[in-house]
Image: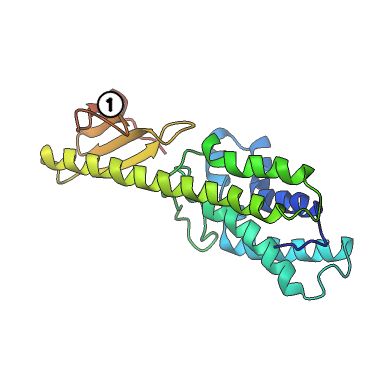
Amino acid sequence: MAGRRLGRRAMLWGALAHSLPDVDFIAGLWNDPAEDLLAHRGFTHSILFAFIAMYLLVQAHARLHPGLYPVKRKAYGFFGVLVFLHLFLDGFNVYGTGWFEPFSHVRVAFNWLFVADPFFSVGPGVALLLLIFLKKQHPARLWVSRIGLICSLLYLSYAGFNKYQIDGAVRREIRKRNWSDSSYMTTPTPLNTWLWYVVVNRPDGAYLAHRPLRSYGGGVALHRSGYFAAGVRTI
């Protein structure tokens, strides 16, 4: 997207732009853990902030590399995709992302991926290493970039398919137990997409389970959580 003129510097600018929404980690220096949970992935992960960041990045880039983008819409496209991609991907894990801050405090969480999944990063990571060493005019550079991104896209799709299967198993278990007044949540356990954590909320408390992707019993071994059943309220 940055074109050949920017060369390897595109990766540095890309890393900066893609990481910019996480500037909110600074709030953790003075917030307590509960406040930090609310501050992280709040306004700096909103659509409004993405537009502000995109504008500031384009202006900074134009000052440092004057004339590199005669048509500024190319620069806006480059930085816009990077910032919005960060917001988009953060919405696929359990943490919750404030896309609509400050107008709405609703957090978006699709629960497809764990917060840090190394398998999602393998493709782009290998591509990055190759792009560092390949010459600027090497014909394979474009294909290396594409393959790295396609690997991540395929893994994200695979994680979504896994969640679909797990959700189906949980819904069947709820119907089997006649728990029509229940709600549930499923999310991957750390660093993988094959073992899932299940929480079913009931009027008498919460029921928990760990459910592998391939379970020979077919059901979900839910057990009541004494912590939640004791009436402890959590944020």
Q: Which quadrant of the view contains residue 49?
A: bottom right
Q: Nearer the viewer, residue 67 or 226?
A: 67
Q: Is residue 16 visible?
A: yes
Q: Quadrant of the N terminus?
A: bottom right
Q: How is the image coloured?
A: rainbow
Residue beneath disc 1:
225
Q: Position of residue 203 (x, y in %)?
A: 20, 39
Q: Is residue 108 left or right of residue 220?
A: right
Residue type, numbered disc 1: Ser
Q: Is residue 27 visible?
A: no
User: Residue 73, relative to residue 148: is it above or below?
Assistant: below
Q: Nearer the viewer, residue 16 or 143?
A: 143
State the residue at coordinates (23%, 27%).
Answer: 224
Q: Position of residue 147 (x, y in %)?
A: 59, 50
Q: Nearer the viewer, residue 224 or 160?
A: 160
Q: Is residue 205 left or right of residue 143?
A: left
Q: Is residue 60 left or right of residue 174?
A: right
Q: Position of residue 85 (x, y in %)?
A: 58, 56
Q: Is residue 146 left or right of residue 74?
A: left
State the residue at coordinates (49%, 32%).
Answer: 191
The local secondary structure at tag 1 comes to loop
